[in-house]
Amino acid sequence: MKLTAVVAGLAALAGLTACSGGSSSASGSTPPLTVAAYSQPTLQPNFNPFSVNALRGTIGLIYEQLFDFNTAHQNEFMPSLVTKYTWATGGKAIDLALDNRAKWSDGSALTADDVIFTFDYMNQHQLLALPVDKVTKTADGVHLTFTKPAYAAIQDLGRTVIVPKKVWATKDPDTDTNLKPMGSGPYSLGQVTGQQATFKARDDYWKQKVPVPQITYVTTSSTNLLTQQLVRHEIDLAYAGIPDVKNQFVQRDPAQNHLWPIYASMKPLMLNLKRKPFDNVHVRKGLALAIDRKAVTDAYNPGVYAPVGPTGLYQGTWSSWIAPADRNPVKPDKAAALVEFAQAGYKQQGGKLIGADGKQLKLRILTVSAFADGMAYSQELAGQLAALGIDAAVNGVPSAAYTGDEDKRDFDAIYGDAFTFGTNPYTFYNKMLSAKSKTNVVGWDDPATESALGALAQAAPDAQLAGSKPLQQIMLNQLPVIPVAVKGTPYMYNTEHWTGWPTADDPYTTPDPGAISGVFAAKLFLSLKPA
């Protein structure tokens, strides 16, 4: 997808008030809900839903998407502008039924014409990453045809943001910052300053009464400040890498302070497969057997990350997709690790793992030095491998150097990147393993993998489990990457002002302050109640 540009030179516009149409309200007796959504010092006003620099809240609060799937709970369908979808023609077509109640904030109806316009507009401006061929109107919505079976792209399709034709027909998505947005969502834009953006509830929202009268997204300048704001309940919802979050936040007020780690992605130890000896599968298997994954996940923030099984899919939410023997994380086994290393020509001599060339096995783990959590996890990994006789250490570098070394494939190993789970394993495995993927930084290039990915991409929903098995076997037998942990995003919230939050016991949505999915964000804020 082409990344759209933001107009340069926009300074923070203190006190900017945007009129987005429709009426709004904010009860004086009900406090606003405050979300820690940014870490940068100054916000640049941008409400262009097609821009990667759009402020959070643009999608979900102002503009709505078609639908999504609840990745926190069995990938359940979550309707938004679309109430249901029906595949046709072997995945090369789909019918979307639109909610005929939907209205723009000026009171006019959101119609199939707006949906057709949005897809045409995105295609015209090279913003469409979907294989859409044509979109036409039907009796209850729209009919899309694709150039190839698009089963695997269903979540990306659902996350398409719909805009009003009458407003966007003359806008340039590359330059327009859309300071007076008009959407169909439950909120209109309030004030924007350099440190916060406020959104006010619409009295005339088409779907339901909006329970939270005002949402304020704020910046936080440091982890220490964020911790203090959370403890003082000045912030209702946040996610960030606060160290020792259970003691620093939850235990300060257990009755009202809560943590729910959402396991949305997997962090592997990634070896440079174009550099010896990491091209040897027995070296990779030896390393995988040497790692104590529980110790790694507890190295910085116990209870936030969790060990993951060898397929890379998290056994807690993907267990039905994984064979029982392959669900649990690999246990550290020094003896078995040494057997694998021996098959690669490495034996322990004087406490060192020495190869046939007489040299000690050496490994440097590249990570970003500014990330305290990443450094802690990498140092734990290096320490474990050093205990086996490997000359292992962490190469902590600035972010720019990390990206540069990764792009040039100038590393032994990386522990920093994470791969997100989706509605089926295609995107997850494709980003890690496809030779065409820019995020396949290890250099894995395998015809069998490409064939399996191609088949899974076109597999119907009832065939996707079987279609994922060859890729799981490649992970188990060839270890193109070494799964270590599932990354838990530490969603922190308090119940002093608002109740009804999603929890592990009631995971009705992912509580996402960053609004990766506008459907997730809207579902959350429309479900809360004053305490």
Image (spheres, rainbow, N blue to C red):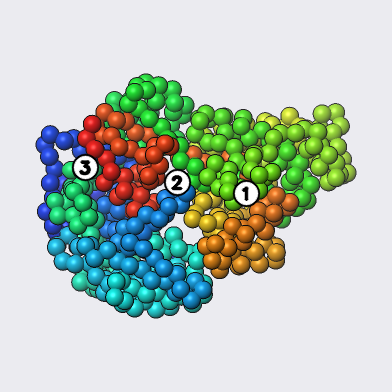
- Identify which residue, 8 or 317, lies in the foreground: 317
* Label located before the other in sequence (3 or 1): 3
Q: Is residue 68 above or below residue 305?
A: below
Please report contact status of discs 2 and 3: CB closer than 8 Å, yes or no. no
Based on the displayed image, in which of its 4 quarters is residue 285 positioned? top right
Q: Give the CA separation, mark 2 to mark 3.
A: 24 Å
Q: Residues within 10 Å of mark 2 (few under 14, many from 20)?
A: some
Q: Residues within 10 Å of mark 1 (few under 14, many from 20)?
A: some
Q: Position of residue 45 (x, y in %)?
A: 26, 53
Q: Position of residue 255 (x, y in %)?
A: 34, 23
- Foreground mark, 2 or 3? 2
Residue placed under numbered mark 3 in the picture: 212
* Amino acid found under the numbered disc labelled 1: Ile
* Label located before the other in sequence (1 or 2): 2
Residue placed under numbered mark 2 in the picture: 73
* Amino acid found under the numbered disc labelled 2: His
Residue positioned 28% across, 34% down in the render: 499
Q: Secondary structure at mark 1?
A: loop
Q: Give the CA separation, mark 1 to mark 2.
A: 17 Å
Q: Residues within 10 Å of mark 3 (few under 14, many from 20)?
A: many
Residue placed under numbered mark 1 in the picture: 322
- Identify which residue, 271 or 448, lies in the foreground: 448
Q: Position of residue 394 (x, y in %)?
A: 63, 37
